[in-house]
Amino acid sequence: MPKFFTEPENVKGNELTISSGDVRHITKVLRLKEGGVITVCDGAGFDYKAKICEISSDAVHCKITEKTRCDAEPDMRVTLFQGIPKAGKMDYIIQKTTELGISRIVPVMLERCVSKIENKKAGEKKRERWQKIAESAAKQSGRGIIPEVSEPVTLEEAIRELKTLDVFFAPYECEETTRLRGILTQNKNARTAGFMIGPEGGFDMSETDRLRSEGIPTVTLGKRILRTETAGEAVLAMLMYEIGDIND
């Protein structure tokens, strides 16, 4: 059954309205008519089985026949702080981590970032594009929310946000002692988690020193060095497995 998203404020009583770009997809691509049945998610964790009642040029009006809590959302809310890589790699990271259950993605401007964001306007343009990728991946994977892609932040801003979470760490290829599994097993009851991944060139040593000085541990992911576009989804998969989201 086709799945679409709408804003929570578009759900009123036993009726809901879809007024996003999905209208064209419903009417022109899927060619659904009045009486057709679709699944609509409010982006806040609830799914609605709904029957199409009326179609206009800019909206699809539906009657709700069933409401259920989406069971595709993990118990732990995980935030990825991603050192900004080249455009195509960031697209891939957003898509795959959304499929795996990420709650939020925060692009971070680090010393070795190849892709530079020159000004606030350019950053907002990138963010809007990345948000659309997250929305598309959320629909495809049956998510109950659309992960938020935040505006790019500095290292210091990322550190402040990381430290508000229950558990936080940064995978680092030069770390030899602290293992990810140890941190995960010690924090199985955590409700929020966050981790930072370096860009293509990895973290600058001054950045890892800064992270450690703020109490954010660096961890090893094993004997092999992962690419920036691989590391985030690998860590997220480990997190989800550890909390029982993947193997339940």
Image (tube, grey):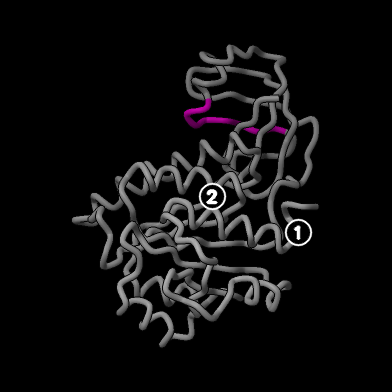
Q: Which residue of the protein is positioned furthest toward the left in this rendering?
A: 118
Mark 2 crowdedness (10 Å alpha carbons): few <14, some 14-19, many ≥20: many
- Image-based side of 48 in relation to 179, left or right: right
Residue under label 2: 97
Q: Is mark 1 on a helix, strand or loop?
A: loop
Q: Residue at x 64, y 30 (%)?
A: 3
Residue 107 image point, x, y percent = 38, 58
Would you identify the image quadrant in which residue 213 lies? bottom left
Residue under label 1: 244
Give the magenta part as a residue range.
Answer: 15-22
In the rendered structure, find residue 123 and report the number of the disc placed on it: none
Residue 89 image point, x, y percent = 38, 46
Mark 1 crowdedness (10 Å alpha carbons): few <14, some 14-19, many ≥20: few
Question: Quadrant where the N terminus lies?
Answer: top right
Which one is earlier in the sequence, the residue at label 2 or at label 1? 2
Q: Which residue is drawn at 43% across and 63% down?
A: 197
- Image-based side of 200 in relation to 10, left or right: left
Q: Is residue 21 magenta?
A: yes
Q: Which residue is drawn at 63% across and 60% down?
A: 238
Task: Residue type at mark 2: give it.
Answer: Thr
> Disc 2 to disc 1, how far (Cα)?
17 Å
- Image-based side of 6 in relation to 171, left or right: right
Q: Which residue of the protein is positioned furthest toward the front in this rendering?
A: 223
Would you identify the image quadrant in which residue 150 lies? bottom left
Residue 160 image point, x, y percent = 43, 77
Residue 52 image point, x, y percent = 68, 20
Residue 225 lies, with reference to residue 219, above or below; the image says above
Label total for image:
2
